[in-house]
Image: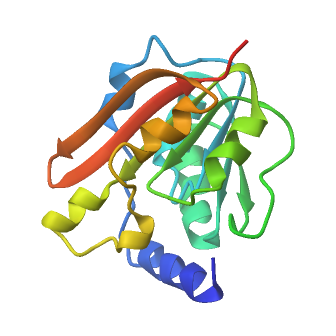
Amino acid sequence: MSEADRQKWDQRFTEGKDVRRDPPAWLRELDDELPKTGRALDVAAGAGRVAVWLARRGLEVTAVDISPVGLALLRETAADEDVKVRTVVLDLERDPLPEGTYDLAACFHYRQRELLPRIVERLAPGGMVVIELATVRNLERSSVPSRRWLAEPNEVLRDAMTSLEVLYYREGWFGPRHLARAVARRAQ
C-alpha cells in the first residue's frame, strides 16, 4: 500500500471511523468450530475488533496493519479488556507476514489476491482461516469501497478450495453490504 493509504487509514481511525468493538456476529455463531487455544494472526486488523475477540477466546494473537493509529486503538481496547495482543505495523503489499505458524488466521475487508496463499503458508497443520470480504455486488447499492477491494462472485470460495477444506461459506446481502464469508481448514 502507499503512504497515502496509510495516511488515509490513520485519519479514519483518528476521526473514529471504522472503529467497532464487537466482533462480527457470525463468528460468535461458529464458536464451537473455531480454536480457543494456540496462535492467531489477524491480517489488516485495523482497530482490532477481531484480534481482541480472538485474544478473549484464549488465543495468543498477533495483529498486523498498515495504520499505527489503528493498532494503537487496538492496544487500548486490549488493555481495557485485559487481554494481550502483539501488534506489528506492516505494508501487506511489500512486507512478509510475521514468521511462525498459526492455528487461526483472520482477514476481514482487505482484498489482495496473492495474500491468501501467503496466509495459508503460515497456517499450522489443521489451522483455520476466517475471511470476510465485500463483493462486486456491493456496487449495486454503494460506490464504496471501490472495485479494487471487492471480490468477484465466489472468488473467496474458489481461492480457498485450491488448498483448504471449506467448512463454512456464505455469500449474499448482510444488511447493506454484499459479503463473502468463509472458514476453511488446512489439512492435518
Q: Position of residue 152 (x, y in %)?
A: 37, 55
Q: Is residue 172 left or right of residue 53?
A: left
Image label count = 0
Q: Name the residue located 40 percent from the left edge and 51 percent from the top edge.
A: 133
User: In this orientation, which residue lies closer to the viewer: 76 or 51?
Assistant: 51
- Residue extending farthest bottom: 4
Image position of 32 with respect to 86: above or below: above
Where is residue 57 shown, x and y percent of the image?
A: 55, 24
Q: Quadrant of the C terminus?
A: top right
Q: Position of residue 88 (x, y in %)?
A: 74, 58
Query: In the rendered image, which quarter is residue 26 located in?
Result: top left
Residue 78 visible in the shown view: yes
Q: Quadrant of residue 120?
A: top right
Residue that appears at 44% across and 55% down: 109
Q: Would you place residue 93 above or below residue 123 in this image?
A: below
Task: Answer above or below: position of 93 versus 41.
Answer: below
State the scheme by which the image is colored: rainbow
